[in-house]
Structure formats: structure tokens, C-alpha cells
Image (cartoon, rainbow, N blue to C red):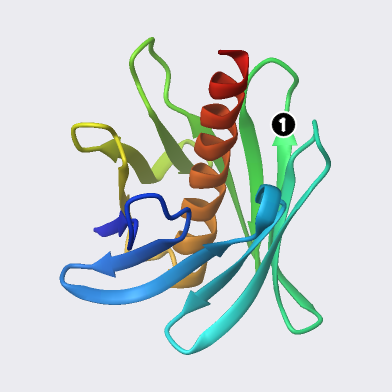
């Protein structure tokens, strides 16, 4: 299980742990348009494209490693492509659910949920077949969307 913590109270950056060991970091850029994503000693650049479309991608140098494109209009789902694999990322259904599920076809291979008293932590559980870079990419997408939702709710008053 990967757990995600903010290193400081008001920080938007995230430290990712597998058990007690740090495995990565997500450093959000200004206005949420992207992030530096560190997995071990490897640095990736995450980019969110579009104000309404919200397509995501991570690259290492000039090579695109993974992409996520929105599916449908009313439902928040994404087609995640990484290497030769294609997954579907879907928001969990229910009024009080705050989470995402990752599917390989009809099989659920991962889940991300918000935990804690103020729902400020993320827990991600993935099948062993999902590599760490893909796990952290999916966690970045979920947290980027949660931050956008929080900003929109704050702006609405």
C-alpha cells in the first residue's frame, strides 16, 4: 500500500511511502498545471493540459511515459495508457465516497481513497503487476483533481 502525506501543513507537495520507506514525491507547480514527480532517483515531468478537458501526461526527458485522457462527458473517468498497458481510472460511486478505482478491463487493479479526520491523506492499493511509476502517476491525477475540486469549492464560497 502506498500512503501519501503532506510534508507541511499548508504544502501542496506530497511524499509517498510504501510502508515506512519513501518511494516518491509529487511537487505541484503553480496553478496546478503540472508537477515534478520523483520515483526513487528518477525525475518525471507531469503536465495537465486544458482547463476543461484535463488530460494528463508524464514524461522523462522527451519521452512520454504515460497519458490519461478523459472518457465521457458527465462521468469523470480516464483512459490511462502506459507502455503497452491501458487502464481505466473511475471515480468511486456514492454520495460520500472520495476515491478512485483503477481497472484493467473489468478487473479492479487499484484503488485510491482519502483518509484521516480531514481527509488530507491518500491511501493507494495496487496489484503487484502495476509498476511504481504508473501507481504514482495515477495518485498524482487523483490528487490533482481533488485539489481542483477543493479550489472550486473554496471559490464558490
Q: Position of residue 112 (x, y in %)?
A: 36, 43
The residue located at (62%, 76%) in the rendering is 44
Which quadrant is home to the N terminus?
A: bottom left
Q: Is residue 17 above or below residue 5?
A: below
**Residue 149 position in % (x across, y down):** 56, 28
Position above or below: 47 against 143: below
Q: Residue 71 or 28: which is nearer the viewer?
A: 28
Q: Is residue 63 above or below residue 27?
A: below
Name the residue beneath numbered marker 1: 71
Q: Nearer the viewer, residue 48 or 14?
A: 14
As helix, strand or loop, the secondary structure at mark 1 comes to strand
Q: Identify the image quadrant of the C terminus.
A: top right
Instruction: List the single residue furthest toward the bottom.
Output: 41
Residue 133 in the figure: left or right of residue 40: right
Q: Nearer the viewer, residue 19 or 128?
A: 19
Residue 65 is situated, as x and y percent measured from the top left of the image, at: 68, 71
Amino acid at each position: 500500500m502506498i500512503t501519501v502525506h503532506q510534508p507541511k501543513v499548508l504544502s501542496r507537495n506530497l511524499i509517498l511511502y510504501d510502508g515506512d520507506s519513501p518511494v516518491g514525491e509529487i511537487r505541484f507547480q503553480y496553478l496546478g498545471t503540472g508537477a515534478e514527480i520523483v520515483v526513487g532517483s528518477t525525475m518525471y515531468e507531469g503536465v495537465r493540459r486544458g482547463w476543461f478537458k484535463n488530460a494528463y501526461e508524464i514524461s522523462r526527458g522527451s519521452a512520454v511515459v504515460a497519458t490519461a485522457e478523459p472518457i465521457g462527458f458527465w462521468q469523470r473517468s480516464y483512459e490511462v495508457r502506459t507502455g503497452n498497458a491501458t487502464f481505466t481510472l473511475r471515480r468511486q460511486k456514492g454520495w460520500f465516497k472520495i476515491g478512485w478505482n483503477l481497472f484493467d478491463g473489468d478487473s479492479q487493479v487499484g484503488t485510491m481513497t482519502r483518509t484521516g479526520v480531514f481527509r488530507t491523506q491518500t491511501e493507494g492499493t495496487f496489484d503487484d503487476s502495476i509498476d511504481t511509476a504508473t501507481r504514482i502517476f495515477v495518485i498524482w491525477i487523483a490528487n490533482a483533481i481533488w485539489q481542483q475540486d477543493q479550489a472550486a469549492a473554496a471559490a464558490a464560497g
